Every structure is written in C-alpha cells, then in structure tokens.
Amino acid sequence: MSDRPLAGRHVVVTRTRERAAGLVDRLHALGADVSVVPLIATVPLAPPDAVKAVASEVKAGPGERWAVFTSATAVRLVTRVLDRIALQPFAIAALGRETAAALSAAGCVVSLVPDRHDGEGLADALVLRGVGGAAVWLPTAEGAGSVLPDRLRAAGAHVRVQAVYRSDMPAGAADRLQRVLRRGVDAIALTSGSTARHLVRALAGAELPARTVVVCIGPQTAAVARAAGLRVDLVAVEQSADGIASALSAHFATLP
C-alpha cells in the first residue's frame, strides 16, 4: 500500500483527458479511481490574422521584445499560427512548468520561467531582468488579471495584451458532475481559477460533501476558489500534476 497511497480513493479531475493526461496517469499509478469531468472548454477569440498582426506590431516596437505566456492554452493557440521561426525575435517568458513544456514542444527557446508560479512572481522576474523600454506581447485569456501587465508598465515596458481565448463550461458538465458525486468522491482537483468558478456554477448552490477534499494546483487557483465560495483543503507546493498527486498522497496517508 505504501506505493499506492490513493488506493480506494475516488478523485475527480476537472480538465479533459487530453489536457490532464499527466495528472490522470499519476493518480492511477498511485491507486486512485479517477473520473474525468471537464469543467473547462477553450473558446478561441483571436483569428490567425489578428495574432499575426499583433505579433508583427510588437516585433516592430522599440528595444527588447518579449512574448509572455501565462498558460499552455495560449501557447497552443499562438503556435498554431506562428512557428518557432516567427517567434525567434522574441525573448520568451513562461508561467509554470506546463506552459514552458508546451513552448519547448513547439520548438521555442524559453528564456525565463520564474520560481513563483503566479502573475506577481512572473512580474518580479521580468522586472528583475530589466524590461524598461521593452515591447511586451501578452497573449492571454479574456478577463485575465491585470497584476502582470500593470507591474510591467510601471517598470517602463510597452505592454500589448491580446485576449486570444476565453474559458467556458462545457454543455452537460453540471449533469456529469452530479452523476459522479452520487458515487461518492474523495477529492476534486482544480487546475485553474476557471475550473474553480465553473465547479461552483455546476454545483448550482449545493455544497460539496464534507468528505470531499478540494485540492488546488497553486495559491492563485486557491485564491480564486475561496473567492468563489469553495472550501480549499489542500494546495500543491509544486504547481504541477506531481504536486497535486503528492498533496493528495500525503493527506490520505494520514487517514484510515
């Protein structure tokens, strides 16, 4: 049992199997019964021509040029339009290991990955590198927080924020969640603020059972979850699939 601390535990993953393959596989390896209930769907917003146009404008800007990615979703949408050659004029910053891995998979060289995996951590790292006078392109989600661009502008950067997608809840997600909850759930893993907000929406005013542990991939997701009214029981130290799995393993190892 020591190498399968989640044996007999039922864990809900709130992203698609394709997007959360690493987490699902890790939880299975630890003995968990995993239900995949996607609570987030990506809706592209910026057409290819718009992505190309903004990238070209920023390339033509003064001083150093940065492309700053805060999610793997933004990476996938941008690299469908711009290949690694088109992105070579930019120094590239990535928020988190998943985002950096998506860039590497697209053949891009990542210049900066901060130790702190939140907007403030990325802003601190970029300011420390010296972005005064630099042109910064930030392809991101609609409604993303303003901490990062505001900090960069305050440091003297010329920041262009481009909403390339928005997150929505898939049709039928609430019904699928309710069916899974009726089976009894030991833990729900939240990997983004959007999954937290959509979980509340899917619950439609109901509360999660007291036995169900809510684990968040990091402090930023946890903050959004709490603001949405969720109880947060665990926050992964490392913001990754392994971090979530480790948090759950340590928690359930202490229980009978």
Image (spheres, rainbow, N blue to C red):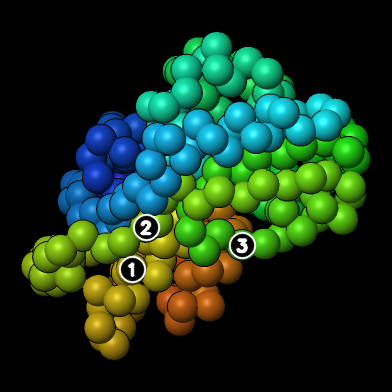
Task: Characterize the local packing of mark 3: few (<14), some (14-19) or many (20 or more) Cα atoms within 10 angstroms.
Answer: few
- Tell me, for residue 145, which label it has, or none: 3
Give the distance between the C-alpha atoms of the residues marked 2 and 3, in whole angstroms: 14 Å
Task: Characterize the local packing of mark 2: few (<14), some (14-19) or many (20 or more) Cα atoms within 10 angstroms.
Answer: some
Q: Identify the secondary structure beneath mark 2.
A: strand
User: Is 4 or 216 nearer to us in this picture?
Assistant: 216
From the viewer's perspective, tell me whether residue 171 is left or right of residue 115: left
The residue located at (55%, 59%) in the rendering is 144
Q: Quadrant of the N terminus?
A: top left
Question: Could you tell me the amino acid type at mark 3?
Answer: Gly
| Marks 1 & 2, CB-CB < 8 Å contact | yes
From the viewer's perspective, tell me whether residue 120 is left or right of residue 222: right
Give the distance between the C-alpha atoms of the residues marked 3 and 1, in whole angstroms: 17 Å
Q: Position of residue 140 (x, y in %)?
A: 53, 48
* First in residue order: circle 3 vs circle 1: 3
The residue located at (52%, 64%) in the rendering is 143
The residue located at (38%, 27%) in the rendering is 80
| Residue at the disc numbered 2 | 167
Q: Is residue 3 visible?
A: no
| Residue at the disc numbered 1 | 198
Q: Identify the secondary structure beneath mark 3.
A: loop
- Tell me, for residue 83, which label it has, or none: none
